[in-house]
Structures are given as C-alpha cells and as structure tokens.
Amino acid sequence: QVQLVESGGGLVQAGGSLRLSCAASGSIFSINAMGWYRQAPWKQRELVAAITSGGNTNNADSVKGRFTISRDNAKNTVNLQMNSLKPEDTAVYYCNADLRATRFSPTRPYWGQGTQVTVSS
C-alpha cells in the first residue's frame, strides 16, 4: 500500500516563508511526476508546481519566482519551498505522485492527506 505523508504547513505572516515536504512510502515500483496542488475554500483544486523524475519543473504563474519545487528520487520525497507568501496562498496543500506500485501496475495518481497553509495579512 502506498502512502504520501506531508509535513510543514502552518500559519505565517505575509512575506514569510514555509517549506512543505512529502514522503512517499510503501509498495512503489517507480515514480514519474510528483507535485503539489492546493485547494482554497470554495475553489477547485489547482496545480501549484510539479517536477518530473528527470528534474523538469512546471510552476503555476501565480507562484513563479516565489515557490521552488525539488525532489530526491532516492528517498521518494518532494519539497516545496514557499517564499514571499501572500494571503491568497492560503489553502490546503496536497502532495501528488504519479507512480506504479508494482511492475505490473499502471501509472496512477496518489494523494497525501493535505496540510493547511494559512498566510495572514
């Protein structure tokens, strides 16, 4: 069974920084892309940043220049460094991994339980 466990959320003032971490564990054959999504109240879940196993990244326009995604393929972890945080960054942040649990499994998305990030003005 695959688990994605996030950590690092919390309350921070506008202009501050937070670092989110996510570790994937369990039966994992291979991981393709990993990423972070967020969902604010009354809004749809949206992509924040993603990174391929080769290190190519894709950031939402709203976080470019402020957020940096990184991963450690050996440890099956992905991190999100968030700087210059704004109140509009307030949301529940979810870790995502597109992975194969076994060599016979198709690639499918797995999700963490979410971690709250609150930015006060």
Image: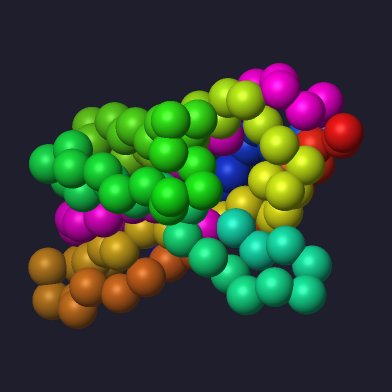
Q: Is residue 53 visible?
A: yes
The one nearer the camera, 11 or 53, is 11
Position in image of residue 80 (x %, y %): 48, 35
- Does residue 113 lie above or below 116 as drawn? below
Q: Quadrant of residue 18?
A: top right
Position in image of residue 104 (x %, y %): 13, 76
Q: Is residue 4 visible?
A: no
Looking at the image, residue 77 sits to the left or right of residue 95; the answer is left
Looking at the image, residue 19 sits to the left or right of residue 41; the answer is left
User: What residue appears at the point 79 percent right and 67 percent down from the top-left corner?
Assistant: 41
- Does residue 35 lie above or below 41 as drawn? above
Q: How many numbered dots are placed on residues in this image? A: 0
The one nearer the camera, 81 or 98, is 81
User: What residue appears at the point 37 percent right and 70 percent down from the top-left corner?
Assistant: 109
**Quarter placement of the C terminus:** top right
Position in image of residue 44 (x %, y %): 62, 75
User: What residue appears at the point 62 percent right and 52 percent down from the top-left corner?
Assistant: 93
Segment tinted magenta in the rendering? 12-37
Q: Quadrant of residue 9?
A: top right
Q: Is residue 116 magenta?
A: no
Name the magenta segment's main secondary structure. strand
**Quarter placement of the N terminus:** bottom left
Looking at the image, residue 89 sits to the left or right of residue 48; the answer is right
Looking at the image, residue 87 sits to the left or right of residue 93; the answer is right
